Amino acid sequence: MNDIQADHQLNQVIRKANKSVDARVHGPGFVKVFDAKKGSISNKPTMMARMLGNRDFLYYFIKTHGKPVVISEWDFTWREGTSEVELDFYCTFEISVTTEEDAEFLVKSLGGYESPTIVLYRLIDSHLHRVLSNIYMKSVREGNSILSEFSDSQGESSKLNDEVSAGVAADLGSARAPFSFRGGFKLISAPPVQVQFSQASTAFEVSDSDVRCNINTSALFVLENYQKYKASGLKDVKSIQQYMKGALEEATQLYLFGNPYYEVVRNFADTISGDIEGHLEKVAHRIGYQVKMFQSLTDIESMELLDGMRVDVSADETEFRTRQSTGHVKVGLSAEMRVSDFDLLKRLIKPGQNGVKSILKKEVIKICRDVITGIERKAFNLSFDDKVVPQIENALTEKLGKRYGLDVNVIKVEQEPTEDALRFFALMGNTQYFELEVNPIADGGEGDIIKIESAFEIIGMSENGWENFENKDYGYRINSEIWTPSKRAELVSAVNKRIDSPKPEEIEHERRDIAIRDELADIALRIKQVVEARLDKVPKLAVAIREVKHDMDVKKAVEALVVDAIRDEWGLEIKLRAFKRGIGRSEYTAIHKSDNAHKMVRRQADLDLKQHEDVNDVILEGEKEYVKTLMERRKLLLADEDRDPDEMRDELEDIDTKIAEKMSRTESLLDLKESEKVISSKKLDKSWSADKFLLEDSSEEKSK
């Protein structure tokens, strides 16, 4: 603002005047005489002074206003003597005079030979220089730019405004007078203290591909030299961003244009990015800025292979066949891959080719398919971690490394269990109770009927049994033909009676439980058929197995029969638990036969036999109740779906052992007491062999 404009603005408050002022023309106010020589108000100039027009006596008209008068855009320049820093400001202030006392204080402060405008300007300028010099020295000590003082208020500083206003007001006497002064300073053309790039994109071409690549750059530029900024002619953030965008395009062409694709991939992070940053630093310095933050990334997907690209293949994306399989299996895996040889990588990923992760995923699935095609179904289902996972890991590491120069770290390989694998694990560890009766067919129906009680446990899969196992269908598979629409409706109805609004998974859980129970029952039925068919043909079996030796022979032979039968038909390995036979009536009659016994001996023998029968009944009844309790406990344990499988197996073995011990204890007790009181009437044929008899013609029985 020029001097005339400044005078005109301040004249609204104070100005020199003639001796008399017409209030009708100039408005309300006060006329004050100022003795410039003495620097004080003179109420009555001497007669001589008035006659001679003494220049030391100056008249001022101070106009009163109902509100403060605003004086705007006075120009100020501040320079720091030892540096290149120079700042320009606009000053806007307000001044208020309402009483005669206010007028006198104002005249004392601004009166003199020079105009009030010049005096007030110098007063403001002196305080501005004082405050800015203090701010500057503080910023130097703290390693900051003085411009940081104006970064948060669009070119204004509250500290500067407050301290300058306070200093000027004090000199004008406002601390003692009711009039006020309040000034505000705005930095003219305040430079942006910070200018930010956010994902500025520039394109470039490589020598071995027609695909245009891009780099995305983010940077932060901070003002360090205000004079260079002023000299640059740039006015605002947008112009600075445009200027630096041109520098970025220049650097892109300088350091990227015409390079081979994989040379860019190999060197971008370590070399090229640093060269681009250095170029931007030089250009930014020319306009008074420095680079505080810089990041440049390319859109080349293969760059990710430098630090490691994770490839995830979900089981839902795969479908493989094992050796000689008619069904599908699924495998999911995750692996991290890093490039070690770019020349080999070109075989798989051409320069400029996108969709790198999809390409790697397809190659991984292809390698997995080659591996799984050579794996037996049993190994896949039952030995996945031990046999399948190592083969997949080795194949991925070797083939991707040798073919395409990739270092592979396999994070995980997981199978999606097949329905038959789930069925096998559901059967594993189950112990199924069964009982059977052996009729004396070989004795013409004259011998004892022998009752056998036992249980079997599924302990594993036979060497070549998986195919036979898969061929069985009891409704476990979701697409099983056993579950006709009507049977499914019955299933849903039965579940609805136990569970309100059952979820689909709850119905499926019940369906599979039924299938497992049916299969276990069928295995038990097959065992009964095999054992009854063989033992029916053994003559005098009831008498023969009275001896412990033959009893054990029978048990071993029976177990061998049923193990072979279930292995051949189901492919499963089983073990008999708690094998127990009942005692035939003929055992007692044979023991107590004596052609020439004394009548008393006969009577005593009869009494002894009766006593033993009573004891036997009591013992058997007690043991039966105990065994019944164990069996109920066993059923409850099998029904507990939340129980850990290993804990359940251990507890089942403990229960079965106790059952076997009770049965064996009862037999031993009766045999001991009877042997003390009776004499066997017949010696057993020592040449009789259960193993030989039971196992002969086994091929014929298997075919049946």
Image (cartoon, grey):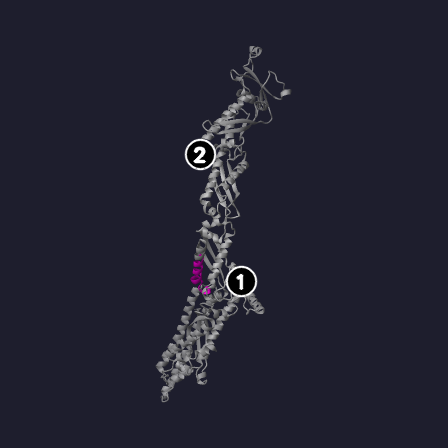
- Which image quadrant: the N terminus? top right
* Residue 386 is a magenta residue: yes
Vertical arrangement, residue 700 with respect to residue 431, above or below: below
The amino acid type of the residue labelled 2 equals Gly
Residue 652 makes an appearance in the image: yes
Q: In this rendering, would 607 be left or right of 165?
A: left
Quarter where residue 696 is shown? bottom left
The residue tagged 2 is 143
> Residue 686 or 464: which is nearer the viewer?
464
Q: Is mark 2 on a helix, strand or loop?
A: loop
Q: Earlier in the sequence, mark 2 or mark 1?
A: 2
Rendered view: 367 above or below 615: above
Check disc 1 and report its element: helix, strand or loop: helix
Crowding at mark 1 (Cα within 10 Å: few <14, some 14-19, many 20+): few
The residue under label 1 is: 505
The crowding category of the residue bearing disc 2, from other C-alpha atoms within 10 Å (few below 14, some 14 to 19, many at least 20), is few
Q: In this view, does 7 lie to the left or right of 439?
A: right
Q: Which residue is rendered at x = 47% and y = 77% of the image?
A: 703
Looking at the rendering, the stretch of residues picked out in magenta corresponds to: 380-396
Which label belongs to residue 403?
A: none
